[in-house]
Amino acid sequence: MSLLARLAPHLPYVRRYARALTGDQATGDNYVRVALEALAAGERQLSPDMTPRVALYHVFHAIWSSTGAQLEDSSGLETSDAASRLMRIAPRSRQAFLLTALEGFTPSEAAQILSSDAHSVERLIAEAQAEIDAELATDVLIIEDEAIISADIESLVIELGHRVTATATTHDEAVDAVARHRPGLVLADIQLADGSSGIDAVKDILKRFDVPVIFITAFPERLLTGERPEPTFLITKPFQPETVKAAISQALFFHPTRQKEAA
């Protein structure tokens, strides 16, 4: 299989990553082009110890790192609000955050790409999340009928610097809560106290507001049916606190409405 054939499925994604990393489409595309030219000329090789996708990002980073410092001054670039916020995050933290949150790499894969180690990458991700959470602090509605779990989630939300404006245990309580106060984020269970559905509650909320939603449930199969648009953020119980924290950071950062409101 030719080099181009091996890399073709991954090119749209590395271009997306390059755009987010540099804050500019033309600049990002230029770095991707230089990386591909280096591979075609034999100046760089894909590591046989990595998957083709990881190896491509690794080569891109080798090219970018050799000249990328000049891109840290983004004053001359036309960037969106989200891109501007990204550019304010320290470079290495930004890279680790984007590789895992946007591109879906594991910390171990991101470590390969960045020529680092998984522990260091996890630390960089935490630093990026802290910066994001501080900038995008918001009001949160928790829809959860189990008191202990609700308290655990509330504690995590507050730890990240957000405000819990209401907790609801039923569909009706959730709808009433958003009528009183519009949330900036919804964390929802599926099966609620009176037999009502958190899915239905979220649908009714989204009819009124465009708000990011994270489902936290012991019944993920009810959402992963392929019969309706599946949620971007779905966490299975029992959950790890760091998983919830990461999802909150990502949901707030990448949601279009949040990007607009943060301007």
Image: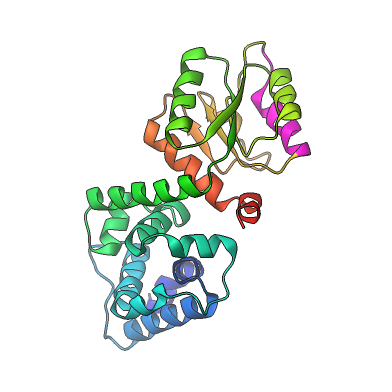
* Residue 135 visible, this angle: yes
Q: How is the image coloured?
A: rainbow
Q: How many marks?
A: 0
Residue at the far bottom: name it: 41
On whether residue 203 falls in the magenta region, the answer is: yes
* Residue 2 visible, this angle: no
Location of the C terminus by quadrant is: bottom right
The correct choice, above or below, for 243 with respect to 8 in the image is above
Residue 214 percent across, percent down from the top left? 56, 36
On whether residue 168 falls in the magenta region, the answer is: no
In this rendering, would 249 be left or right of 258?
Answer: left
The correct choice, above or below, for 185 with respect to 116 in the image is above
Residue at the far top: name it: 194
Q: Quadrant of residue 195?
A: top right
Identify the residue at horizontal 42%, vertical 50% (top origin).
131
The correct choice, above or below, for 169 with respect to 129 in the image is above
Identify the residue at horizontal 47%, vertical 26% (top origin).
153
Q: Which residues are magenta?
A: 195-208
In this rendering, would 168 be left or right of 44?
Answer: right
Residue 62 percent across, percent down from the top left? 29, 74
Residue 16 percent across, percent down from the top left? 51, 67
Identify the residue at horizontal 45%, vertical 70% (top origin).
18
In this rendering, would 21 be left or right of 63?
Answer: right
Location of the N terminus by quadrant is: bottom left
Most common SS among magenta residues: helix
Q: Between 105 and 143, which is closer to the camera in this rendering?
A: 143
Residue 154 percent across, percent down from the top left? 49, 25
Identify the residue at horizontal 42%, vertical 33% (top origin).
159
